[in-house]
Image: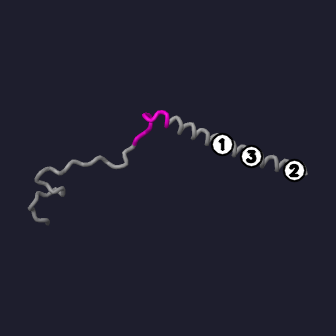
Amino acid sequence: MIIRQGLNFAAHFAAGLAFGALAVAAVGACLALQKQRQHPETQVWEPTMPPPSPPPATGETGWGEPPGTPAA
């Protein structure tokens, strides 16, 4: 009986530790999000698209051949 109670205590103690760690992580994430909302200038901005490329130079079609040149 004492072994069973010891195992029960150990299982519930481990579950409590895991639940406590989860709660600490959730509070930390909420605080970080709140801090980020208070200081939007510190947010990391990454562009979702590359910058537009300049148009091709006059006399080129963009494929490296001048207009009017037959394709090989």
Is 44 situated left or right of 70 in this image? right
Query: Gap in Å between the C-alphas at discs 3 and 1?
Result: 14 Å
Select label 1 or label 2 by which is in front. 1
Point 74% across, 46% down: residue: 14
For residue 23, the mark is 1
Q: Is residue 68 magenta?
A: no
Which of marks 3 and 2 precedes in the sequence?
Answer: 2
- Residue closer to the observer: 36 or 71: 36
**Position of 71 compared to 46: left or right?**
left
Q: Type of residue at label 3?
A: Ala
In space, the residues marked 2 and 3 are separated at their CA atoms by 16 Å
Q: Residue at x 78, y 48 (%)?
A: 12
Vertically, is 64 above or below 32?
Answer: below
Look at 11% across and 57% down and name the residue there.
66
Q: Which mark is residue 14?
A: 3
Q: Position of residue 50 (x, y in %)?
A: 32, 48
Crowdedness near tag 2: few (<14), some (14–19) or many (≥20) residues, C-alpha within 10 Å: few
Coordinates of residue 28 in the picture (x, y in percent): 59, 38
Q: Amino acid at mark 2?
A: Ile
| Label 3–label 1 contact, CB within 8 A | no
**From this viewpoint, which residue is outermost toward the front?**
38
Foreground disc of the pair 2, 3: 3
8, above or below 68, in the image = above
Asked if residue 2 lies left or right of residue 59, the reply is: right
Amino acid type at circle 1 is Ala
